[in-house]
């Protein structure tokens, strides 16, 4: 009997960044001189819609979820120019509308600016059709548990859209870890991503907003693992807290069997999203590498479909 042909997986990459043309990028001012050449290339991709669309076919990815990190466009004091979030959201919505099913957009708002952030999120979702919101893990001394961030969190829960809780280079942590070079940068960003998630859990925001859904990067997996060691009788690799199992999703930030297996063990296959961090990381041969990771982890067909794209699409179209 002939072999049954299995249809290829639909790959939805949740972790991608795009600013769009006409929005001044300021990140080079904070990049060490040896890395500026690489970041000039990244910035060129961040502002190039044709490169973004072409990357789908080049990588074998079905769809990308795009977001604009405020740290790429903020001024030296960490502030966003007036009206810039609106311009970015308008541009992202226009591009997404030209490529339905291939691009999905997350809103850019000032998440730590009280009601104004919530109002722009409501406009971006209800008026522009964007499907979630990008939230930096911190803003100065503020974490997502701060009163200034609560309106945006409440709006996301009410609108039924996910929050992509993204790492930043926290200044205090960066000063402490910068002797470790690029590894120190990852340690900085992973630590603040975990701290932001802890702030949400410990402040009771999941209880206040039962429909709140948070996506963290794989850099926060160490924090989720640590959360499972707290409590009476906790084991070294203890159970992930129930609130995290319900409300938290993690992306793979690259395609590696160890990261994938850890995320699934901690959160479940239904709470893991494929993500590459394009264009900061340009992944080649993604379908093949993802299938190899699935095989190494022993995932069945249902789990593969969920991680490859099903979970992302469910988050993006839930409401």
Image (tube, rainbow, N blue to C red):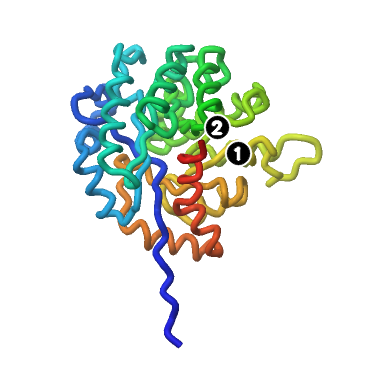
Label drawn at residue 6: none
> Image point 41% across, 43% down: which residue?
14
Q: Nearer the viewer, residue 26 or 35?
A: 26
Residue 168 visible in the shown view: no
Report which residue position mark 1 lands on: 224
- Please give the count of numbered marks on the rendered protein: 2
> Image point 55% across, 17% down: which residue?
150
- Name the residue furthest bottom: 1
Circle 2 crowding by C-alpha within 10 Å: few under 14, some 14–19, many from 20: many
Above or below — where is 75 with respect to 207? above
In this picture, residue 4 sits left or right of residue 229:
left
- Name the residue furthest right: 233
Looking at the rendered structure, the secondary structure element under dot 1 is helix
Circle 1 crowding by C-alpha within 10 Å: few under 14, some 14–19, many from 20: many
> Image point 33% across, 15% down: which residue?
80
In this picture, residue 152 sits left or right of residue 207:
left
Q: Is mark 2 in CB contact (under 8 Å) with mark 1?
A: yes
Q: Quadrant of residue 44?
A: top left
Could you say where residue 159 lies in the image, as x and y percent from the top left? 51, 28
Looking at the rendered structure, the secondary structure element under dot 2 is helix
Residue 58 visible in the shown view: yes
Tell me which numbered mark, 2 or 1, is placed earlier along the sequence. 2
Q: Nearer the viewer, residue 298 or 256?
A: 298
Label drawn at residue 194: 2
Could you say where residue 68 lies in the image, as x and y percent from the top left? 34, 30
Q: Nearer the viewer, residue 264 or 91?
A: 91
**Marks 2 and 1, how far apart in space?**
7 Å
Above or below — where is 104 with respect to 2? above
Q: Quadrant of residue 213?
A: top right
């Amino acid at each position: 009997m002939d072999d049954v042909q299995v249809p290829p997986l639909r790959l939805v990459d949740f972790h991608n960044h795009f600013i769009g043309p006409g929005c001044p990028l300021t990140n080079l001012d904070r990049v060490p001189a040896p890395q500026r050449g690489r970041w000039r290339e990244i910035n060129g991709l961040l502002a190039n819609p044709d490169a973004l669309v072409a990357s789908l076919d080049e990588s074998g990815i079905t769809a990308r979820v795009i977001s604009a990190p405020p740290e790429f466009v903020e001024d030296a004091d960490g502030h966003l120019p007036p009206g810039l979030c609106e311009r970015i959201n308008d541009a992202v919505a226009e591009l997404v509308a030209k490529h339905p099913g291939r691009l999905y957009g997350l809103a850019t708002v000032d998440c730590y600016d009280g009601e104004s952030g919530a109002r722009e999120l409501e406009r971006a979702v209800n008026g522009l059709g964007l499907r979630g919101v990008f939230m930096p893990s911190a803003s100065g001394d503020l974490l997502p548990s701060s009163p200034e961030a609560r309106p945006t969190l409440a709006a996301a829960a009410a609108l039924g859209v996910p929050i992509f809780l993204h790492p930043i280079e926290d200044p205090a942590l960066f000063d402490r870890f910068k002797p470790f070079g690029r590894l120190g940068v990852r340690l900085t960003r992973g630590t603040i991503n975990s701290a932001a998630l802890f702030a949400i859990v410990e402040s009771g925001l999941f209880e206040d907003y039962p429909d709140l859904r948070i996506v963290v990067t794989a850099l926060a997996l160490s924090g989720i693992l640590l959360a499972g060691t707290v409590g009476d009788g906790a084991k070294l690799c203890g159970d992930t807290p129930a609130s995290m199992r319900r409300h938290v999703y993690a992306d793979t930030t690259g395609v590696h069997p160890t990261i994938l297996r850890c995320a699934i063990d901690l959160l479940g296959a239904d709470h893991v999203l494929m993500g590459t961090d394009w264009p900061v990381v340009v992944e080649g041969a993604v379908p093949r590498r993802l299938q190899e990771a699935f095989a190494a982890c022993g995932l069945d067909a249902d789990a593969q479909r969920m991680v490859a794209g099903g979970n992302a699409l469910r988050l993006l179209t839930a409401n």
